[in-house]
Image: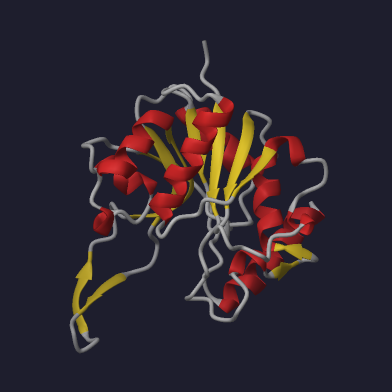
Amino acid sequence: MSKRTFAVIPAAGTGSRFGGDTPKQYLPLNGAPLIRHTLQALLADARIERIAVILAPDDTTWSAACLPPQSAARISLVREGGATRADSVINGINWLKNNIQLDYEDWVLVHDAARPCLHPDQLACLIDTLVDDPVGGLLAIPVADTLKRADQATRVDATVDRRQLWQAQTPQMFRMGQLQHALSVGDRTMMTDEASAIEQLGQRPRLVIGSLTNLKVTYPEDLALASVILAAANDK
């Protein structure tokens, strides 16, 4: 029997690196809040039964405009965002377990709230590639630029061999039980994404090639680029 597939979007962050008073997931992007585009991207694959959006308990910015049309049956708001991303994801998994009755082996995709340009083909490729994988994995792209390691004076200390380096993206797709365990027992100081938590268990997540267009809006200039990417996708 094939396992079911769910998604968690941690959306309790404040977007401090972006600046401004409005969390970046709510910034206007091509006529809608950014997070609406993110949700629409995940809804494109019917295999994702339910998406849990994890909001801060005191979030007052979320509105009906954030929901794509006719999506209420597949999206649940969970106002249990934690102090860290790992806390929010764990709370999202717990909500799904308690309300949807997930199995230990069911799949959970974790996707950044501020990554709105995920293409349906990339999402489908991730799920198709990992559906029978014993560990799970993530979208990622090989590093193309030359990498420099800096010293404390911001001078080049060394050039880093990039040949086996990849830039991690989301979604990241893992079994519910193992992901929950990894996030709960791992060293949070070394946990920059879900894959790094799984790695602490001694597992080796699979890298599934993604796309440069699947960017995360982190800085103000990223918003303009995301606008162009979405507009180009809609014109096809």
Furthest-front residue in view? Answer: 58
Q: Is residue 35 above or below residue 91?
A: below
Q: Which one is nearer the viewer's eye here, 122 or 198?
A: 198
Picture coordinates of residue 227, whole percent (x, y): 70, 67
Residue farthest to the bottom?
Answer: 153
What is the x, y in percent for residue 13?
51, 64
Residue 55 in sight from this viewpoint: yes
- Left or right of 76? Residue 152 is left
**Quick one: 183 or 155, which is closer to the camera?**
183
Residue drawn at x 28%, y 54% is: 188
For the residue pair 74 and 32, the one nearer the viewer reads as 74
- Tell which residue pokes out farthest to the top in this image: 1
Residue 21 versus residue 59 in the image, above or below = below
Q: Work out whether 216 lies above or below 134.
A: below
Q: Residue 53: where, in percent of width, then height?
A: 60, 48
Q: Is residue 17 above or below residue 91?
A: below
**Image label count:** 0
- x and y percent of residue 60 in the render? 66, 65
